[in-house]
Image: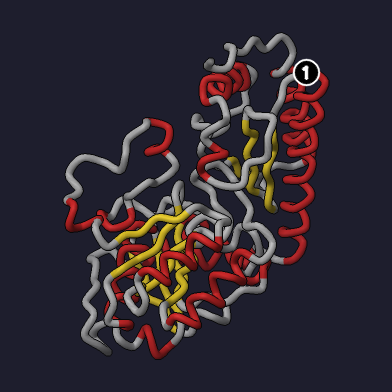
Amino acid sequence: MPAVEMLRLTSSGTEAAMSAVRLARAATGRAKLIKFAGGYHGHADAVLVEAGSGVATLGIPGTPGITAGAAGDTLVASFNALPEVEAAMMRWPGQIAAIIVEPVAGNMGVVPPAPGFLEGLRRLTRADGSLLIFDEVITGFRLARGGAQERFGVTPDLTCLGKVLGGGLPIGAYGGRRAIMEQVAPAGPVYQAGTLSGNPLAVAAGLATLDVLDDRAYRQLEAAGARVAATLQSAANAAGIAITVNRVGSMLTAFFTGGPVHDYATARQASAAAYASWFQRLQAKGVSLPPSQFEAAFVSTAHDEEALAFLGRAMSDSFIGLRLAPAPG
């Protein structure tokens, strides 16, 4: 990732995002943060506002224990809605420290960025003097060797990493331009530390993972993701069940709704109860998907032809005779 000129390792994605936000506020001398409804950036107080993933599934508005002061500088816009971001910046001129975004949302289910959305965030932050933070805890090394920033050609100021970086072991990292990262102690005044940050075992596993993620692996992931998404849509159509399948690379979500899903509001129109019934049917057939309508599913390089064929048969069968509760109202 060329945008990451310096890197600081942490033990989790939550720590990486929390530290990146703190660094952005210190570097800009500003307090306010813009995040997007349904975006999940770990469970630090400042970003656990209108979060997705498990918070969305459980219907928890943030979580008890977060003070109004901790969340008061966090502004929330709709994903893929540039006018809302622009309006926030006009309302609080010179007060926005950063925008933090999952370049492909993965915690309201998979929601791709609309054409021009990420580019628009880059333009707005540069004009405002604020920083753009890409939370690539999910997308980093999953969508491309250079992450979503390579796939979409948009360069952030700071990047948060995790998950794939450790090859399955606990790790996180944040990094960016040298001028910003040099403000982190001991080079600068912004403190961050962790006893197990940079754990040698996790780092070794991550390096080994990166060694095998070559062009062939990404071609395999792209093809497998497209195959599973097509199978899902075709099987649902044949059974007369309305779903919308969103996919970017090896990330995908089947939403039980007939309309497009482009933000948190449209994601929440999908039937979580229908997804739960389908999930249980698939599990009985030996396929384990995320148990929440609002979490992303991932295809991996371990899914060979035999596994994909099995998955295709199970998914096709799972829609046959599926009975869904009528929509509310």
Front in this rendered view, residue 101 or 311:
101
Front in this rendered view, residue 266 or 226:
266
| Quadrant where the image shows the N terminus | bottom right
Q: Residue at x 37, y 68 (%)?
A: 91
The crowd level at tag 1 (other Cα within 10 Å; few <14, some 14-19, many 20+) is: few
Can residue 74 be seen here? The reply is: yes
Quarter of image, res 6 = bottom left
Q: How many numbered discs? A: 1
Residue 147 in the image: above or below residue 313: below
Can residue 165 be seen here? The reply is: no
Residue 1 in the image: above or below residue 74: below
Q: Which amino acid is tagged 1?
A: Gly
The percent position of residue 244, horizontal first and vertical second, equals: 69, 35
Q: Residue at x 44, y 49 (%)?
A: 37
Side of 61 relative to 120 (left or right) = left
Front in this rendered view, residue 162 or 119:
119
Front in this rendered view, residue 234 or 85:
85
Residue 37 in the image: above or below residue 259: below
Q: Residue at x 35, y 79 (%)?
A: 94
Quarter of image, res 305 = top right
Q: SS class of the residue under badge 1?
A: loop
Side of 323 relative to 194 (left or right) = right
The percent position of residue 323, horizontal first and vertical second, equals: 64, 10
The percent position of residue 114, horizontal first and vertical second, equals: 66, 57
Residue that numbered label 1 is attached to: 240
Side of 147 relative to 232 (left or right) = left
Residue 227 in the image: above or below residue 101: above
Q: Residue at x 67, y 43 (%)?
A: 246
